[in-house]
Image (cartoon, rainbow, N blue to C red):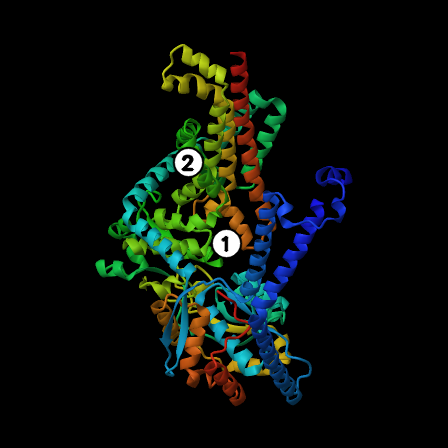
Amino acid sequence: MRIKTIAAIAVLAATLALAALACSSEPEVVEVVKEVEVVKEVEVVKEVEVVKEVEVMPTPGPKETIVFSDLNWTSAQVQDRIAQYIVEKGYGYPTDVVFGATLPLFNGLRNGDSHVTMEIWLPNQDEAWMEAQSAGEVVSVGESLSKDWQSAFVIPAYLQEEYPDLDSVDDLKDDKFKELFATAETGGKARLVSCVIGWACEEVNAAQIEGYGLADHVHIVNPGDGAAANADLYGAYEKKEPWLGYQWGTNDPPLLLDLVRLEEPAYSDECWFTTKACAYEDATILIAVHPDLLNRAPDVVDMLRKWSFDIDIYKAVAAWMDDNPDANANDAALWWLNGNSDVWGNWVTGDAASGINAALSANERPDGWPTE
Amino acid sequence: MAQVEDSQSGPGSLLRVPALTDLPPKVLWGTVSAVLLVIMIACLAIWGSGMEFPTTVSTSESPTASGGSVTLTKTVRQVVGGEIDDIVDWLTVEGAWLFDGLSSGVTYALIRIEDILKWVPWPVIVVGLAFLSFMVGRWPLLAVTVVALLFMGFMGLWENTIDTLALMVVSVIISVAIGLPLGVLAARSSLADNIMRPILDAMQTMPSFVYLLPGVLFFGLGPPAGVFATIIYAVPPVIRLTNLGIRQVSAEAVEAARSFGTTPFQLLTKVQIPMAMPTIMAGINQTTMMALAMVTIASMVAAGGLGDNVLRALQKNQSGNGAIAGLAIVFLAIIIDRLTQSVARKQQASLSVG
């Protein structure tokens, strides 16, 4: 008997639930349906557009996704977002990003897992670059940022204000300055935070210090991770303590903090390929693509060849990001694209420019942008 | 089933339509609340289908050069994360005297230990450890020890092995100094035990990178930051097993000691800790092993040692070098584990005899 009653009640409950569902959901369902319809319409329109473009364009087949290497520093990510916006909204290719560190991403570019890298740093990556280029696995299509950045030994600006005489690597031989950087670990030598373990700069910096005659004056600390090196500098900067170390252009601290370089003997090929007792060569930053892209998306390659996102532009973006701590790379790209159509307008075709402007005024965001 | 029904409702019940009031109140209310629950879930499912978690705290407009603006959103995560950043920044500056002091102390101890170990010629260390191994583990352990030490030497990893050993010794000494009293406290007070347990869980599961960076902000790059990270990861076993060991001391033994009029301090030092010693030693052994497991992580913050070799091999994509450095860490762990375990076993043996 009990089972029957429970069954009866269950049926009752189910009916009630259905009734509740029906009555409460009526308006919602309609809305949902509407949304779906709207989305569909938009999709249809897009498809039609794409099909038309394909008919006009000489390259056959649908436009395949273009994958950008999302190197783990801000300038590369901002450039990726801007390029993604232009490629998606102006040229109609879907885009995507792969995250990672320099070396894995470079291998990805060689294999064709990613198609565009906006920043290949030379000479830092010289060996791998030459090898890949001679094997025809990567193609350079131009430069980004510009040549004035380099890797160097730096100190915070507040320290140089306090000690104006401390302005070159030779000054580190002076006991007065050595003491500033000495810690319990260093036994009276100056502590110098050098390069990440295993990076090319680890050996280069060691050779430079040897070449400058600083081996007896400097104690080298090599962290195992770039973020750890940054944290060490941030900690010292926060406390306004002396700090001496190696910094490189793509890293965040040179952009966020006021650092000054110590003078080093000027770069020359002769010195670099023998003793390395001279400063790093000014960096060249290449835009590289996988060779397949040349045939598959010649319009995008043309755009990248005209790309000129120089260091002053990036410094303005970095300053804006510093003023707006809530902003991520996506926001920064949107902000820059909105205000600088005269700059990026020179890189793109007229059709692409109107597509991008339309997307910007509709406040659209590319599908390929990662959420942060 | 039929029998039960019959006996409950009597003859003719099959024809009667059951009224709700016939049900026992428990079943009735249970059913009613079940129905309400179903309706509630159904409603939530419908209303909530298009709903997202409200993650946005506020939005702001940032003007662009063209006269438009970009909408920036401030998320809950940014607000909470910002608060934590502020606390870490405050600690970095205001706690500098404390962290600098700790850092100097740890560095001093490390340098002394490294100096001593590097001053002793390697053949002395090899023969000494071989003798020790023979005492506790006879020929098999002696063979393992000698092969392991010679491997480290011939692979050019001797100095880095000693750095790692010094790092481990200092980490373990500090871990035991912190962990033993806390373990005793946890054993004596259930409140302390309940407070400590989730903290210990967090220490063991929190990804090391999360506390590694604040560690660098506080201590700077170098061995002290590595020791700090190692202690966070390695101290829980001492606390847990000290607690367990003392709680496992038989009530009879404690009762007997009490009846002889021991003070609580005597009870702890003369009865509970000695009887818990095998378990505590197992805890220290665990701590040692976990400290070695942190070697590579510690190298990320420039603590030095064998972790450097592993990291360098990873960065340069040299599997062979990575395997060699990894093996050296494993060998070091095996030697230390066997030696400390046999000490624990001897203590257990002497305890059961005594």
As helix, strand or loop, the secondary structure at mark 2 comes to helix
- If the image is split into quadrants, where does the N terminus of chain B sit? top right
Give above or below for A92 relative to B136: below
**Residue B316 relative to residue A160: left or right:** right
Same chain, labels 2 and 1:
no
Residue A246 appears at what percent x and percent y?
39, 58
Residue A108 appears at what percent x and percent y?
60, 65
Viewer-proximal residue among B19 and B93: B19
Residue at (69, 53) in percent of width and height: A8
Viewer-proximal residue among A107 and B114: A107
Q: Can you see residue B340? A: yes
What is the chain letter for disc 2? B
Residue at (73, 48) in percent of width and height: B16
| Three-letter residue code for mark 2 | Glu
| Three-letter residue code for mark 1 | Gly
* Residue position marked by numbered label 1 in the rendering: A198
What is the chain letter for disc 1? A
Give above or below for B292 relative to A367: above
* Residue position marked by numbered label 2 in the rendering: B114
Residue B305 appears at what percent x and percent y?
47, 42
**Residue A324 relative to residue B126: left or right:** left
Give above or below for A98 relative to B17: below
Q: CA distance from mark 2 to mark 1?
A: 24 Å
Viewer-proximal residue among A230 and B308: A230
Residue A297 appears at what percent x and percent y?
61, 80
Q: Quadrant of residue A103?
A: bottom right
